[in-house]
Amino acid sequence: MRKVLPVLLLGLMLLSIAGFAGISHAARPAGIVIAVDMSHGQNPGGLVELMHLIPEADWVVIVKTEDDIANLPTWVQNNAYEIRAGGITTDNLNYVDMLIIGQPTELLTPDEVNAITSWFNEYGLAIWVAADSDYPAQGSEIAQQAANQVLEAIGAHIRVDYVSVEDSQSYAGKTYRVVGIIDPPAELSFLKWGARKMLFHGPGVVYAIDENGNPVNPITNPVPNVYVLVRTSEGGEIVEHQPKAPGEPGNVGVFYQVGQTGEFPLLVAENLSGKIVIASGESPYSGYQAGITWIYYGVVMQGPQFFKNLVYWATGYMGPLMDIKEIYDKLDTISDLQSSLNSLQSTVSNLQSTVNSLSSSVDDLTDSVGQLQGDVQDLNNQLSQLKDDLSSLQSTVNGLSGISDKANNAFYIGIVAIILALIALAIPFVKK
């Protein structure tokens, strides 16, 4: 019995351990988990600086093979939360909140696209696919193709076109070194906090697909839930550098055409059922010159701050942007109140003008009434005079009437006298 008890206890302990092991799960990392793709031919330019920008994040670097780890900067090897080999897989996207695929020089495999789509639909909060221009130094237009592979697979309404854009007004030394203007819509105005410009060295250009399936420039033809966050100046111009492969005789612009000028989208975000999709014509890391570069050919830019703002917003973490957003919201409220006040002042001014006009009309009417009263008084005076004249005339008429009566009496008496005289004269003749 004594031997059986220890065996039973040991068995219970093993079952207990096995049971706990069966129901336990690894705790998720404490910080925002941001995965950066380095498995599609990207160079590490700007990667260290990128990871420095959000120190509270847990940075995961995805490489193709174990051997590629040695090619990463030493600081990245020592400070990344994890370096995951094997490319983009479901396992390598475990616990990832945001995935950044910066300027790939190799297309994604169907398995990688499927892994991204599954991750994004189930767990992902945000994805940023950063492409490039069609400048010949790249050798192809693979960056645009790879970006569009992902964007199409996840059901986004934004794409990167197969052309380049330059800017004759906002640039760093050369027009192809575009200095993008950070200009989000009013509801996302907090994203430009501390950030006005960002480098887009030789960028491609983004277009959107409207509700009818047509490609459009979302600056001039807004699409629901699509936000242009960075654009060229009015000096933007569409150019074609690589009319050759892939897809000979060449991928010309799907929407934009060579020679077009005006404002063009450089970085666009879409709210896709609560998840954020970002597409850009250049990359925050890798490429010829990383987009987070703060000064280039003497032009100071705020790419680092904008990158932070974008990640804080896209992941929903917000971080320092929480207070900034409240300030911007209050500024919007103040602006709305100011607009209402201006409108009210305009209404009051219009009412005052109406009152002044009415007052002037009343004054004119009062003067008219006064004039009319004077005219009436004059008429009354004239009427009184006329009455007096009529009374005098009546007296005269009465007097004349008396004289007429006397004259009539005298006339009749005279006639009677004449008749009597005639009778007297006739009597003698009658006697004879």
Image: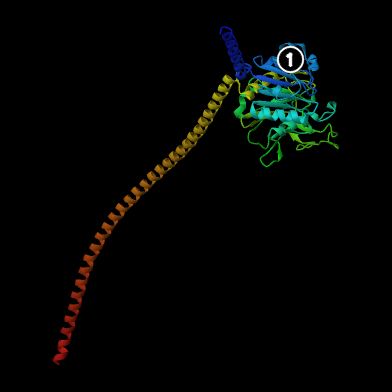
The three-letter amino acid code for the residue at tag 1 is: Val
Q: Residue at x 33, y 52 (%)?
A: 382
Q: Nearer the viewer, residue 343 or 3?
A: 3
**View extreme (front): residue:** 1
Residue indicated by mark 1:
48
Q: Residue at x 76, y 31 (%)?
A: 110
Residue 122 showing in the rendered view: yes
> Taking 384 as reference, is 204 left or right?
right
Residue 59, above or below 150: above
> Taking 48 as reference, is 423 left or right?
left
- Dot 1: what SS? helix
Q: Quadrant of the C terminus?
A: bottom left
Q: Quadrant of residue 412?
A: bottom left
**View extreme (left): residue:** 431
- Say few, some or many: other residues with alpha carbon within 10 Å of mark 1 (under 14 / 14 to 19 / 20 or more): some
What percent of the width, then of the height, locates residue 319?
Answer: 60, 18
> Taking 14 as reference, is 403 left or right?
left
What percent of the width, then of the height, locates residue 329?
Answer: 56, 25
Residue 271, above or below 56: below
Residue 33, above or below 120: above
What percent of the width, then of the height, locates residue 243?
Answer: 84, 34
**View extreme (top): residue:** 2
> Taking 378 as reference, is 100 left or right?
right
Q: Quadrant of residue 415?
A: bottom left
Q: Quadrant of the N terminus?
A: top right
Q: Nearer the viewer, residue 379 or 127?
A: 127
Residue 400, above or below 5: below
